[in-house]
Amino acid sequence: MTEKLFGSKLRAKVLGWFFTHVDERFFVRQLESLLKEDSTNLSRELARLESLRILVSEREGRQKYFQVNKSSPIFEEMKGLILKTAGVAGVIQSALEKVEGVKYAFIYGSFARNIEKPESDVDLMVIGKGHLDEIEDILSKIEQRLGRTVNIIFYSLKEFREKIDSKDSFIKTVINSPKIMLIGEENEIR
C-alpha cells in the first residue's frame, strides 16, 4: 500500500524515517547506513522530496543535511498520513497483522497526542491471544528500523476486560485518551 501511495518503496521508507524524526537532520551517508539503501538512489530521492518542498536542506561544511520542512502548509497532514502508513503506526501495524491472535492493538501516549519529541518512545498496547515473546521479537526489529523504543503492554482479552470492569485508573486513562488504532475498532474496547 505505501509503495503505491507514495510512488516507490524507497520514498515511503525515506518519508517514514524523516516524519518519525521530525526534529532531526541527516546527511546522505548517514541515511545510507540507517536505511540500508544505496546512496545514489537516496540522493536522487532526497532531491525530489526537496523540490517538492517536503524536505529542506542546509549545507554545513562539505555535508548537506536534510530535514522535514515543518513550515510547509501541508506538514501536519503529511505527518499524520505518513505516520499511519509508512511511519511508526504503519510499520508496527504491518508487523502485528502477521501475529496470530492479536485482537486489538493501538498506540497511545505522546505519539497518539501528536506531541512526541525526538527522544519519545512509542507506547503500544496489544490485547488478545498471542505470545509476548513473539511480539517482543518483532518489536525489537521495528525499534532498530524506526530508531525508537517501543514500550509494549500486553493483556489477554480476559485480563483487559477485568481491568475495565474494576475501573483500573491506568486503563481508564488510556481508553479515554487519543490513540492510533492499528488492529480492531476503538469502540469495541470501551
Image (tube, rainbow, N blue to C red):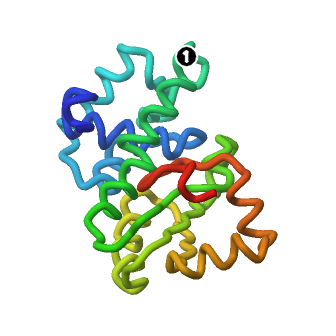
Does residue 120 lie above or below 125 as drawn?
above
Using the image as rendered, state which of residue 152 and residue 54 is in the foreground: 152
Q: Identify the residue at image location x=40%, y=74%.
A: 140
Q: Is 46 or 78 nearer to us in this picture?
A: 78
Residue 109 lies in quadrant: bottom right
Expressed as whole percent of the image width and height from the top left, the position of residue 55 reads 45, 25
Quadrant in the picture for residue 153: bottom right
Residue beneath the point at 37% across and 80% down: 130
Above-or-below relation of 27 to 78: below
- Residue 183 place in picture, x, y as percent: 41, 55
**Left or right: residue 26 compared with residue 29:** right
Residue at 29% over, 37% down:
12
Residue 103 vs 67, above or below: the answer is below
Read off the residue under disc 1. 72
Identify which amino acid the numbered label 1 is placed on. Ser
- Residue depicted at 44% across the width and 16% down the height: 53
How many C-alpha atoms fall within 10 Å of the one at disc 1: few (<14), some, or many (≥20)?
Answer: few
- Report x, y in % for residue 1: 23, 38
Q: What secondary structure is marked by label 1?
A: loop
Residue 163: horizontal and vertical position, in percent? 69, 76
Residue 146, image quadrant = bottom left
